[in-house]
Amino acid sequence: MKTSFISTSAMSTATRLSLSKTQFKLADAQKEVTTGRFADVSATLGYKTGQTLSLRQEYARLKTIIDTNSVVSTRLSTTQAALKGLSDDSKLFVSQLIGARNADMGPTVVQGQAKAALTSFTNTLNTAVDGAYLFAGINADVRPLTDYYATPTSPNRQAVADAFLAAFGTTADDPANASITASDMQAFLDGPFSDLFADPAWTTNWSSASDQNVKSRISSSELIETSTNSNDVAVRKLAKAYAMIADLGIKNLNEAAYQTLVDAATRVAGEAVQDVANEEARLGIAQERVKNANGRMSIQIDIMTNSIGLLEGVDPYEASTRVSALTTQVETAYAMTARIQNLSLLKYLG
């Protein structure tokens, strides 16, 4: 007959092994109570693990796009505010030009207004958000518009002065400009002066922006333009109208040439108002598409969250019950180990 070896050491070792296993189970149960999902998803789900991994990857991708869209929305909102400022300034300038048609009262005042508007216009076009210029297209790290009133004389202002000198043989502040005829002024405005706001002169002297606007992926299937740039026709027209009044010798012109200049500036600025509105509408559509895309992706994320929960989720009540039961087992095991360690044959001898 065979008997098993029995000793306090053997019993203590067996109890410690059982305690160790129970502690691991308790740790897993506590983790499940805290996270609400299986402690070891792959071991629990088996062949369904791939399904939950795919869901989590898609969930993370959509969350990333939504987070990126928040940045896109901020840039769009700031750009829209800048465009509104340009629109308001251009409308005000048109009204000032209409009021300045009286050559005896208007030239000095409207010239000062044009200079102020041109400075504000430049500052607006050079607006940046988080170090990225809003009106630079994809050249977001480059200041898009040259400062017209920079020191030393900026290339765009020098180009205006050179064109005026070449056309009339005088500088803008020369009293001799009173001899410039209305037809000569109109020819200059339609020819050499207009050329300064067309390529290649514009991109050489005025703008460092890219014609290509920033494109953003706003959903899994949508890639749209979410910026504008200072090469836009509205920007060119505003710069043209402001520079026309600010630097073409308006104070020294005769009545006919003065009226020709003011009329031309009024027409160009009025066209720019409509062009700015068109750009606001284009970016407004982009804003709406971003908003709608976020709404659709939020619904998808909710569905995925529910699906992941069904696959990985644990019953919180059942998990809590297991924690309580395992805690009791651990406490019992500790008590048994302590009692076994206190067993000694010496207590029964003597």
Image (tube, rainbow, N blue to C red):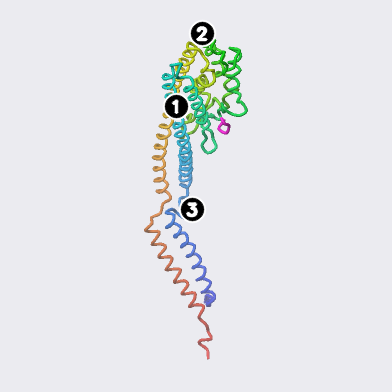
Instruction: Using the image, tell me which numbered label, if any, was put on residue 89.
Output: 1
Q: Residue at x 42, y 29 (%)?
A: 284
Q: Nearer the viewer, mark 2 or mark 3?
A: 2
Looking at the rendering, the stretch of residues picked out in magenta corresponds to 139-143
Tag 2: residue type?
Answer: Ser
| Crowd rating for badge 1 (residues with CA inside 10 Å; few <14, some 14–19, many 20+) | some
Q: Residue at x 48, y 35 (%)?
A: 75
Q: Nearer the viewer, mark 2 or mark 1?
A: 2
| N-term-proximal mark, 2 vs 3 | 3
Tag 3: residue type?
Answer: Ala
Q: Position of residue 288 (x, y in %)?
A: 40, 32
SS class of the residue under badge 1? helix
Left or right: 295 in relation to 209 = left
Could you give the CA–CA distance between mark 2 and mark 3, rounded to whole angstroms?
Answer: 88 Å
- Judged from this view, the residue extending furthest toward the left is 317
Instruction: Using the image, tell me which numbered label, if any, was put on residue 43.
Output: 3
Q: Nearer the viewer, residue 203 or 24?
A: 203
Q: Position of residue 173 (x, y in %)?
A: 56, 18
Instruction: Using the image, tell me which numbered label, if any, was put on residue 183.
Output: 2
Give the answer, above or below, for where 108 lies relative to 178: below
